[in-house]
Amino acid sequence: MLTKTIFYICVFFFQLLLSQANDLNSDKKIIFDTIKEIKLFHSPPEPLFIGRPFELSLVVEINESLLSSVLLFFKTNKMETYREITLHGESGLYNYKIDIKKFPGETIDYFFAVKTINGRIYGAPIDNDNNISPIKKIFIDPVQYFEQKKRLNQ
């Protein structure tokens, strides 16, 4: 009986040692490589409507033979962690259509990462200190948007 109790206690503490803490590295920033010759271009779509799918695009000026992967990371305000999506494209243009019905929320945060075959990682968008700076967009009601636009055009 005592060995069984000790065994369960050891298993419990072993699980605690190997578990991952969500906020362990929450204050650390992601820093990406930068080389002036490597260019990543993204223009956020405007506007993003509630309940309507939209497409996020990234243009990469890197020879495709040098790329290991092109990734999109996004999360809505109702998601706890970022979702990682591998992007597929051709001629340097990578797209992903997000169906907001599958990923509900009122806002979305996202950024891109490009990994080369030599292991370097480049991100977009980044700030002046090469830290990732996710884009945050708010979903708006299309009826209100077009009514407001109509009032402004009169």
Image (cartoon, rainbow, N blue to C red):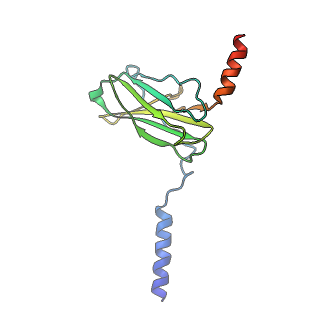
Residue 134 picture quarter: top right
Q: Residue furthest top?
A: 154
What residue is rendered at 63% in x and 38% in y?
106
Farthest left residue in view: 65
Q: Residue at x 58, y 44 (%)?
A: 27
x and y percent of residue 37 in the render? 37, 19
Left or right: where 90 falls relative to 40: left
Depth check, front residue: 98 or 42: 98
* Quadrant housing residue 104: top right
Q: Position of residue 9 (x, y in %)?
A: 50, 76
Of all residues, the one furthest to the bottom in this rendering is 1
Please provide percent x and percent y for residue 113: 43, 34
* Horizontal and vertical percent position of residue 43: 50, 22
Give the position of the C terminus as an image quadrant.
top right
Between 59 and 104, the one nearer to me in the picture:
104
Q: Is residue 49 above or below residue 78?
A: above
Residue lying at 49% horizontally and 60% vertically, measured from the top left:
19
At x 64% / y 30%, what residue is drawn?
Answer: 140
Numbered marks: total: 0
